[in-house]
């Protein structure tokens, strides 16, 4: 992947001043040595879950490739999109993070008639495993991936050709 630029990045570069800040942000949260709060595995799981929930094929493809690079099996990749809460492939901490990705992405933190906010319960579960800093980072990573999903889908950005993905 080194030396190649993803189509989403190429499009974002049309607004160079904003892109410069955006890309600095991406580097900061993707590098565990910089952020220091979450593992690459947790970040990989929640970014894939976010893209699956949004149905964003562009980022599902990218995040699946990333997951495989992190050692995710096909069974684990399928479980992220399935009943992950019943799966023994995830730790309790990872299940809490995946649940938080659902809450944030699907806006389940809002109460609606007949459905109370799911945020308090999910937050209580997160606090069993994560520090305040980690919960903030989880939420930033999830929110940022929601941004990229909407950005690529709304602008109908094409997936890179197969020869560029290898």
Image: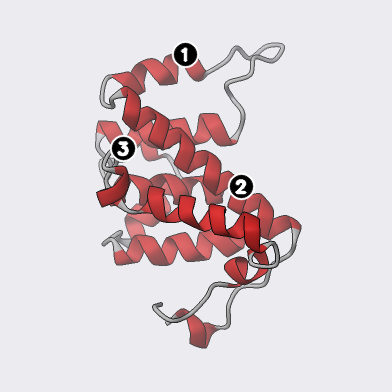
Q: Secondary structure at mark 2?
A: helix
Q: Would residue 54 appear left or right of 43 to someone viewing this image?
A: right
Q: CA distance from mark 2 to mark 3?
A: 22 Å
At a point 61% along the width and 66% down the height, the residue shown is 8
The image position of residue 104, as x and y in percent, is 54, 31
- Say which residue label 1 marks: 120
Q: Earlier in the sequence, mark 2 or mark 3?
A: 3
The image position of residue 46, as x and y in percent, is 42, 44
Tell me the mark number nearer the camera, choosing from 1 and 2: 2
- Say which residue label 2 marks: 147
Rendering quarter of residue 13: bottom right
At a point 59% along the width and 53% down the height, the residue shown is 148
At a point 37% along the width and 28% down the height, the residue shown is 135
Q: Secondary structure at mark 1?
A: helix
Say whether marks 1 and 2 touch (CB < 8 Å).
no
- Say which residue label 3 marks: 94
Q: CA distance from mark 1 to mark 3?
A: 18 Å
How dense is the environment of label 2, judged by Cα within 10 Å: few (below 14), some, or many (20 and up)? Answer: few
**On screen, residue 166 above or below 86:** below
Residue 91 appears anywhere in the view = yes
Q: Earlier in the sequence, mark 1 or mark 2?
A: 1
């Amino acid at each position: 992947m080194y030396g190649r630029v993803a189509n989403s990045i190429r499009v974002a570069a049309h607004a160079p001043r904003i892109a410069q800040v955006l890309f600095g942000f991406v580097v900061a949260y993707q590098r565990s040595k910089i952020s220091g709060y979450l593992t690459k595995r947790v970040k990989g799981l929640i970014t894939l879950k976010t893209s699956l929930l949004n149905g964003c094929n562009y980022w599902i493809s990218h995040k699946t490739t990333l997951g495989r690079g992190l050692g995710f099996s096909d069974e684990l990749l399928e479980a992220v999109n399935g009943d992950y809460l019943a799966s023994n492939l995830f730790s309790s901490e990872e299940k809490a993070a995946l649940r938080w990705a659902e809450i944030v992405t699907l806006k389940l933190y809002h109460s609606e008639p007949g459905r109370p906010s799911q945020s308090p319960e999910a937050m209580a579960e997160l606090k069993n495993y994560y520090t305040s800093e980690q919960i903030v980072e989880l939420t930033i990573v999830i929110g940022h991936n929601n941004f990229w999903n909407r950005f690529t889908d709304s602008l109908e950005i094409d997936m890179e050709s197969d020869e560029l993905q290898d």
